[in-house]
Amino acid sequence: MYRMTEEEFERAIDEALQSIPEEFLRALENVAVVAQDEPNAYQLGRAAGEDEEWTEEELEAWFDEANDEANADAPDEESDRDALSDEEEFDDLLGLYDGIPLTERDDYAGDIPDVITVFKGPHERLCSSREEMVEEIRKTVVHEIGHYFGMDEEAIDEMGYA
């Protein structure tokens, strides 16, 4: 586990955005990229493809379970996540695109901005060094921007950003 201050985390997000080719950045319209400590019930429901929001009780149960599993199964801080066996899988939500992808916009007024949220806690639990965390943040930002452009999980995975 590697910890960053809020300022470091936000700076890493800014660096990730700066690494994206200018033609893609210019195409981003009415989208906010924000940092958040942990996903809330609504965001977890959106990520799971559910139409309804999670209750706070469901969120707390999920968070407690995720923390218990992370504490029980996580390698010590000196090792990196590659020490996890192939059967173990990290399933925290690193980021979320919440909006209408460009490919699905017909009569889009653009009143409420789309939002890309990058979650600090899950990145910290996943990474064991600053370098690893900065790279994961970059991958997350690119992944969520892919969703903005209408790419599905399979296409993003094929590009190496899953």
Image (cartoon, rainbow, N blue to C red):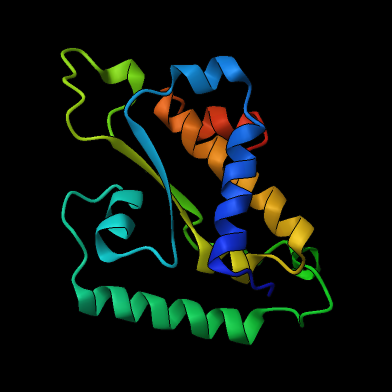
Quadrant containing the N terminus is bottom right
Q: Does residue 98 appear anywhere in the picture?
A: no
Q: In which quarter of the image is residue 78?
A: bottom right
Seen in the picture, residue 60 relative to 86 is either above or below; the reply is below
Q: Residue at x 18, y 71 (%)?
A: 55
Pick whichever, 2 or 19, lies toward us.
19
Seen in the picture, residue 51 relative to 107 is either above or below; the reply is below
Q: Position of residue 129 (x, y in %)?
A: 77, 66
Pick whichever, 38 or 153, lies toward us.
38
Q: Where is residue 8 in the image (x, y as percent from the top left)?
A: 62, 61
**144 to the left or right of 86:** left
Pick whichever, 123 or 21, lies toward us.
21
Pick whichever, 10 or 153, lies toward us.
10
Q: Which residue is drawn at 35% across and 50% down?
A: 47
**15 to the left or right of 62:** right
Q: Which residue is drawn at 55% across and 54% down?
A: 10
Q: Where is residue 51 in the image (x, y as percent from the top left)?
A: 18, 49
Q: Does residue 135 appear anywhere in the picture?
A: yes
Q: In this figure, what is the number of numbered marks?
A: 0
**113 to the left or right of 89:** left
Q: Residue at x 25, y 17 (%)?
A: 105
Q: In which quarter of the image is residue 139?
A: top right
Identify the residue at the far front of this view. Answer: 7
Q: Position of residue 6 (x, y in %)?
A: 53, 66
Quadrant containing the C terminus is top right
**114 to the left or right of 73:** left
